[in-house]
Image: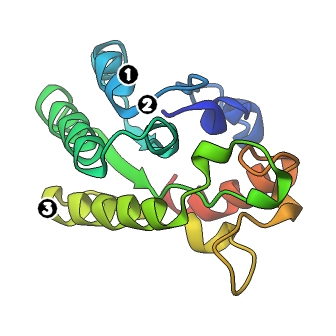
Amino acid sequence: MGNSITNGCEWAELFGKKNIKNRGISGDISQGAYERLDNIVNGKPKKIFLLIGVNDIARKIPTVITSQNIEKIVMKIQQVSPKTKIYLQSVLPVNADFKMFENHQQPEKIHELNAEIQRICQKYKVTYVDLYSHFILPNTDKLNPEYTNDGLHLMAEGYLLWKKIIMPYL
């Protein structure tokens, strides 16, 4: 579940499992994810992987609001579908060198939100999945250009890395 970064992959095909559903929507923000959550949790999924927040940053939504929305998502999943395992994934870095998505290029806000996501995971006893550290260009706060062609979205190599990171949780 997430935004265009999640939406950009054929997850069922990548993992070879037809029961994996892609609930990514391009441009989605944390409030939008919360508002469409009923359609997902009512199906009582075994697992939900959430990556959300970079579009909140781009729209200048305060981190505290994004964090509250993510908390509401976790609480709702736990209330409606208590057997569903929740995996909150860190927001990925963005690479300004591509001169695109300027509003998304706020590494300090990404770090701040990722710290909040970790806090939520501890508070609600859900799993934090650190994608960020795997996708940065070493010694920078930039998305490694090996994984992107626009500085924000992933190419096939990026999705293969993501698969490798989350495989232990499947």
Q: Secondary structure at mark 2?
A: loop
Q: Is residue 5 above or below residue 146?
A: above
Residue at 38 percent across and 22 percent down: it is 32
Instruction: Assess whether mark 1 and mark 2 are in contact (beta carbons under 8 angstroms).
Output: yes
Q: Which numbered disc flags the more N-terminal residue, 3 or 1?
A: 1
How much space separates mark 2 and mark 1, taking CA atoms?
5 Å
Where's residue 92, x and y in %? 59, 57
- Quadrant hosting residue 164: bottom right
Disc marking residue 123:
3
Q: Earlier in the sequence, mark 3 or mark 2?
A: 2
Q: Amino acid at mark 3?
A: Lys
Side of 134 relative to 32 (left or right): right
Asked whether 140 or 158 is in front, the reply is 140
Q: Is residue 38 left or right of residue 91?
A: left
User: Circle 2 sits on which residue?
Assistant: 29
Q: For the residue marked with disc 2, what is the amino acid?
A: Ile
Q: Is residue 12 left or right of residue 61?
A: right
Residue at (28% x, 15% y) in the render: 38
Local secondary structure at mark 1: helix
